[in-house]
Amino acid sequence: MSAELEGQTDGQFIKVQEVLEEGRVFFGRLINGKTARFSFPEPVDLHRGEVIFIGEDDKWYPAPDTVWPEDASVGVVRKILDDGVVIEGGVGIRVIKGTPRVEVTVGNTVEYSDIDGIIRVIAETPLRYRDAGVDEDLHEYVVDASENGLTFESFGGYEGVVERAQELIETQLDRATELKAIGAKPVKGVIFTGPPGTGKTHLARIIAQVSKAKFYLVSGPSIVSKWVGDSEETLRRLFEDAEKQERAIIFFDEIDSIAGRRGSDTNGESKRVVAQLLTLLDGFEVESNVIVIAATNRIEDIDEALLRPGRFDWEIQFPLPTVADRLKILQLRASQLETLDPLPLEDLAQLTDGWSGAMLTAIWTEAALLAAGDGRASIADEDLALAFERVSTRPARVRAEAVSHVA
């Protein structure tokens, strides 16, 4: 603070709002919120946003910004006008008049106030508001699959499905150089379809593990935000981050919840998300080593534009397991548990016609509970038989929901 200002005892602090008449007149806001007009016989070198002190002698003195109460807000630049900037903040959209003090572009997150205009750029991209505050990274979508030890042998049955997934996805990631030399177009997207509980998410995790790809798991509902434009921005940042990796897989679970067919009755948020996803799929660089996988049990509800060539190019169907598949699923799970032989797995595979892999897994969960409840450390055939009866008598909806994490 200047020595001249320190010597002043009476007066008031003013924040300059607008300077007129070549510097001879200016409007300023007082700390109490009122606006006042000031004039000087000679031009003064003042600018919008500056804080000054006007003493009883009607002279003005520069004052530090710290003496003025904080009144700044944070928002995202949505449009730049000839006479101002459109800002989207927590209370809606507003126009900040005048030329910004700093250079800004659409999408910047900025600090601004009614008096000062745009004060500074906080981030080049929109920051997202969450219940816990501002979230600047994508960690909630990244799954570390490096420690789970999954292999294709961890997926019981479905040999044809596994072979097709290896052919389309592993070849795409491991043989990118050869495919480019051939001149083949890269596979951008693969969609897994089939009933709940057939292992779609499980196989996607295995693919990420085996291929050593960075794995982004996006649950359909989790990407939807109440803030306009936030869902699309999250998608864009996910794809940008994936393209920076040596290899990456973006997996959309329940994609039908965010990319349903667009129609006259579709809400604006859904239309914008589908449009953004289409743009991102079409904007893939040929050199990028990224695969997008989506899973749904309602392929008929997916917007047909996503299923055209060049987007989700290939569909891999996960039917309900055959009797041979069911036996392999049961055997795989048995090998991971403490059991007492012999177990009637062949009979169980025959009795579970129409069951999904998740429902078969539920049998083992029930059997383990029965054995532990009886004070035993291994599963016997009577546990398995009673577990089968319990699971088979549950309503189909309850059976599916109880193990929906396996789907």
Image (cartoon, rainbow, N blue to C red):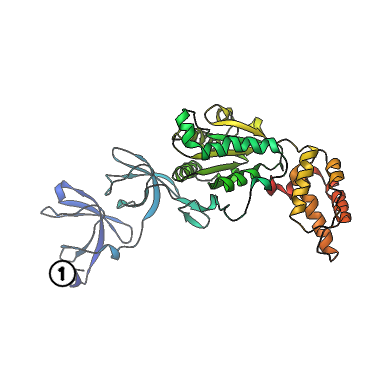
Residue 140 in sight in this render: yes
Q: Nearer the viewer, residue 138 or 71?
A: 138
Which residue has dot 1 on it?
4
Query: Residue 156's x, y, as percent?
Result: 72, 44
Rendered residue at 24%/57% (across/down): 50
Rendered residue at 21%/72% (across/down): 9
Query: Residue 70's x, y, as percent?
Result: 35, 61
Rendered residue at 83%/38% (across/down): 353
Q: Secondary structure at mark 1?
A: helix
Q: Is residue 157 above or below residue 40?
A: above
Q: Nearer the viewer, residue 87 or 189?
A: 189
**Which quarter shows the C terminus?**
top right
Query: Residue 120's x, y, as percent?
Result: 32, 53
Rendered residue at 84%/47% (across/down): 345
Q: Is residue 397 above or below residue 59?
A: above
Horizontal side, residue 234 vs residue 256: left or right: left
Question: Which class describes the residues within 10 Å of circle 1: few (<14), some (14-19), or many (20+)?
Answer: few
User: Disc 1 residue type?
Assistant: Glu
Query: Residue 233's x, y, as percent?
Result: 46, 43
Q: Nearer the viewer, residue 186 or 195?
A: 186
- Residue 160 position by quadrant: top right
